[in-house]
Amino acid sequence: MCVVMTKQIIALLALLSIGTFSAVYAETTTVEVPFDSHGQTCSFDEIAVEFHCVWQGFKEVYTLEDMKVYQGLLSEQRYDQEIQKINEAALEAIAVEQAKLTPNEKIIQNIEQKLDRGTATARDSVLMNLLKELNTCKQGMDDRTQNIQTAREFEISDFQLWSVNNVKYDGVLGEIAMAIEECEAQEEVYKLSIGYENFEHTKQFSLADKFTPDIQAIPYSQWTETNSGINKSLICDSNAHSQQYKQQFGCVILYDGLDAESIKAQNELRFGTDGVMNYQSQVLDDYNKFLDTYGNIHATIEDKKVEEAIAEPIANEWKDDHNFYQNSLED
């Protein structure tokens, strides 16, 4: 922003001398200077009778070299502001240059900076050399392979020493390494496909068109429709997968022709849902009845008489049939 400064000049003009008389004329003039100035110089040309003044202003844009010159003339605040402007302009210029770089060029630049700092690894060096010698490989774009391959062009590198370094090939480095090996394989495909060199490739030959023109090879509508359905038959009907895997996949598992839901319904109908196993057994009934009447701790006198009446005939029968007991009675 320019500020008009008003300056007053007292000009002393020496006029022509007439005889021995000479006159000196002084004039005050106001000049508007359209910028800030830090000094002025004036000079008088006696021959041309001209009075020249020069005002020294400040630049709109400073460089670092300018700041060294004007450091003593600018205020500290103005000096700091101009230094900040220079730094911002430099950062903006760097950002513009960075935006022009491709992703690969940015990787190369980053690795070069690491090399300057001494922090680069062997893997960084291999990647940088691969990126510096990028090239392309083509498949299906020549007279031979165009008959058997889809036209495609992919990126490789001409750097030959990438495989002699013991580094981990992953990320961008791994992708380039795989592309190089694929291109080497493509060279073999080209050699082996010499028999296709003179094939007419303007028409695609189809066995279906020749032998079954009225039969559709695949359910075209099914392959072109948009839905979220999944054909589970390849898993569920295959013997190559375990029952557990099929069940996790969502297949219906059959046991003797019944699925799990049908078996559950049958069991609930037969045994109920209370968790109690219900069945009839005469032996078990007699045993439970015995447990209910046996071992009455609080037996009464009447209970004991009943038990004695039951036990007495049994004991007498035993005595009559027991020979050892009968012999002891006779003795």
Image (spheres, helix red, strand yellow):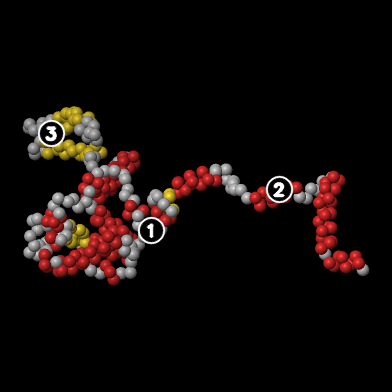
x then y, percent, for residue 225: 24, 44
Work out whether mark 1 precedes mark 2 in sequence or the reverse, and give the earlier one.
1
- Which quadrant of the figure contains the N terminus? top left
Work out whether mark 3 precedes mark 1 in sequence or the reverse, and give the earlier one.
3
Residue in the image at 21% along x and 66% along y: 185
Inspect the image, locate mark 3, and give the three-letter code of the amino acid beneath it: Ala
x then y, percent, for residue 253: 41, 52
Residue in the image at 9% along x and 55% along y: 203
Q: In the rendered image, is residue 148 in sight?
A: yes
**Closer to the eye: label 3 or 1:** 1
- Secondary structure found at label 3: strand
**Closer to the eye: label 1 or 2:** 2
Compared to residue 64, the image places residue 163 above or below, namely below
**Closer to the eye: label 2 or 3:** 2
Kindly indicate the quadrant of the structure image that contains residue 158. Answer: bottom left
Q: Which residue is mark 2?
A: 289
Q: Which residue is mark 1?
A: 241
Q: In the picture provided, is 147 more to the left or to the right than 241?
A: left
Q: In the picture provided, is 122 more to the left or to the right than 20?
A: right
- The foreground one among 318 and 47 is 318
Q: Which mark is residue 14?
A: 3
- Secondary structure found at label 2: helix
Compared to residue 71, the image places residue 208 above or below, namely below
Residue in the image at 53% along x and 45% along y: 270
Q: Quick one: label 1, few (<14), some, or many (20+) residues within 10 Å? A: few
- The foreground one among 299 and 67 is 299
x then y, percent, for residue 307: 82, 50
